[in-house]
Structure formats: structure tokens, C-alpha cells
Image: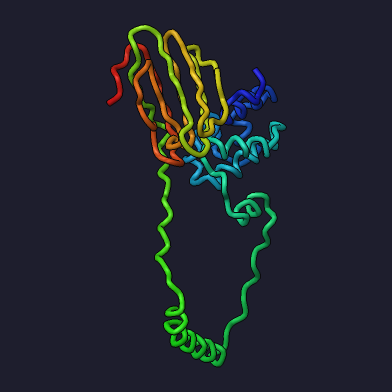
């Protein structure tokens, strides 16, 4: 199977083994803790201490095992739903930004001038504000990220399992593994897309940006498996009881 069809973590693990490295050797070369390397290879990015650190660690590993880091970042964005990142983050991630020099000390005379200017602005603002109608800005929604260490077992039918994943909004990344542990699908699902997966025993489903898809298992509508930006790990087994 080509690396394109693997999850990000599976791609890192497969390429590392192909290059003849152990996780301990990668840890020694990159100075990344071995436990974090194992988490990254299991698609667990939260243990790095944040997505910015996860990106840096993935790039460091990619350099050692000769993977295209830009391609890995595309997969990372699909998994985490981080499609719109501030340019400063991208520059910092690629070591392009330069640390700001320490500013000169401001004299008391300058501070006094600034204070006078601030007072003048405060007096002028109410007059200017009355010329325009304004509405309070909506508070941005904050996406929750679940702990990928938790795996939820959800209900299936008595014989075999069929999972239908349908995109409802935005874009989400989905990874599917069958009962043998083989990766049968790894890719993005957009609003309006629908994909069906079957297995005689079990299907392991990982969804990035869980609030953007709807799941149907053996004809039962389970709705969205999580929140926008949330990464969930689900296991659908033929002997499980139905969710909800």
C-alpha cells in the first residue's frame, strides 16, 4: 500500500521502519522523547503540548526518514481541522522569523506625552462612536480536542458491520482500519461526500474535525461523533450494543 493511503502516524511508522530506525534511535537523533514519537505514530498529537509543537516534531522526524514534510502537514491539517493558521505561526514553524531586539527604555518625558495623547483619544472616541452604529462582535467558538487515548466502542448489528460516513459541513479527515488492522481508507471527506465501509467483525474509525461528519452504523443514524475540531477514535464491533 502506498504511503498516500496511510494515516499520518502510520506513514511515519512505515517510513521509519523502512529506513531501518527504531523509535529510540529517532529519539536520540531528533532529541524528541521516545514516548512522543510513539504517540505521533499513533496519530496522537495532543501529547506534544500543542499543535505547533506537534508540527515541529513531525517535521524533525520527516527530515530523518526522508519524508515530504509539506505532504505530512497537509495530512495534519486534515486530521486536526487546522486549515487557517496565522502566517506568523507558519513562519515560526519554518524558522523564518527573527527574534525582536530589546526595545529602548522610554523616558518619563515620552511617557507623559503618550499619556496626554491617550487622554485626548479617550475624549474624542465617544463623539466619533456616535456617528456609527455598531454591534458587539461575536465571540469566536473554541473547539474542544478530545484525548485520543480514549476509544469508544459503539453498537453494531449481530452479523458484520457497515459504517457510512457522510460529510455535513466543512472538511474532515477520516481513517478506517478493518478487523485485521489494515488501513482501508485514509483521506478527507467534504460536505456532501458519503463513503461506506464494511467488515465481517470490526471497523476502527478515526475522525478529525468530528463535528463535520455524520455516522450511520448498520442502518442506525448516530449523528455527529464529536465537536468541530475534535479528534475522535471509535470502534464498531458486531457484538456491541447500540450507542444512545
As drawn, 198 above or below 128: above
Above or below, 62 relative to 203 = below
* Residue 174 in view here: yes
* Placement of the C terminus among the 4 image quadrants: top left
Quarter the N terminus occupies: top right
Where residue 208 appears, as percent x and y from the top left, is 49, 34
Q: Residue at x 45, y 21 (%)?
A: 164
Q: Which quadrant holds residue 31?
A: top right
At 55% across and 34% down in the image, what residue appears? 37
Question: Does the rendering let one see residue 38?
Answer: no
Which residue is depicted at the point 69% across and 31% down?
A: 65
Q: Position of residue 58 (x, y in %)?
A: 61, 38
Q: Residue at x 46, y 41 (%)?
A: 229
Instruction: Estimate the x, y position of residue 220 in percent, counting from the top left.
Output: 34, 20
Residue closest to the eye, 70 or 84? 84
Comparing 35 with 175, the one in front is 175
Residue 13 lies, with reference to residue 29, above or below; the image says above
Give the number of marks: 0
Residue lying furthest right in this view? 66
Residue 30 vs residue 232, the one in the foreground: 232
| 4 relative position to 220: left or right | right
Q: How is the image coloured?
A: rainbow
**In the rendering, at what x and y percent does residue 107 appear?**
57, 88
Amino acid at each position: 500500500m502506498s504511503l498516500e493511503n496511510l494515516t499520518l502516524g502510520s506513514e511515519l511508522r512505515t517510513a521509519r521502519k523502512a529506513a531501518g530506525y527504531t523509535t529510540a534511535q529517532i529519539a536520540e537523533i531528533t532529541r524528541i522523547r521516545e514516548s512522543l514519537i510513539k504517540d505521533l505514530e499513533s496519530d496522537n498529537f495532543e501529547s506534544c503540548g500543542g499543535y505547533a509543537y506537534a508540527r515541529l516534531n513531525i517535521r524533525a522526524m520527516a527530515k530523518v526518514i526522508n519524508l515530504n514534510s509539506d505532504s505530512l502537514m497537509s495530512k495534519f491539517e486534515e486530521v486536526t481541522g487546522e486549515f487557517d493558521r496565522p502566517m506568523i505561526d507558519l513562519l515560526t514553524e519554518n524558522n523564518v522569523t527573527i527574534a525582536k531586539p530589546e526595545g529602548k527604555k522610554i523616558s518619563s518625558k515620552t511617557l507623559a506625552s503618550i499619556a496626554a495623547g491617550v487622554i485626548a483619544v479617550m475624549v474624542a472616541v465617544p463623539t466619533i462612536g456616535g456617528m456609527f452604529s455598531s454591534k458587539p462582535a461575536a465571540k469566536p467558538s473554541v473547539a474542544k480536542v478530545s484525548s485520543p487515548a480514549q476509544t469508544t466502542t459503539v453498537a453494531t448489528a449481530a452479523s458484520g458491520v457497515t459504517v457510512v460516513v457522510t460529510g455535513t459541513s466543512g472538511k474532515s479527515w477520516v481513517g478506517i482500519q478493518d478487523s485485521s488492522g489494515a488501513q482501508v481508507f485514509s483521506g478527507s471527506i467534504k460536505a456532501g461526500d458519503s463513503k461506506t465501509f464494511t467488515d465481517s467483525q470490526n471497523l476502527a474509525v478515526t475522525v478529525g474535525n468530528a463535528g463535520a461528519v455524520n455516522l450511520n452504523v448498520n442502518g442506525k443514524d448516530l449523528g455527529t461523533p464529536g465537536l468541530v475540531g475534535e479528534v475522535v477514535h471509535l470502534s464498531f464491533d458486531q457484538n456491541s450494543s447500540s450507542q444512545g
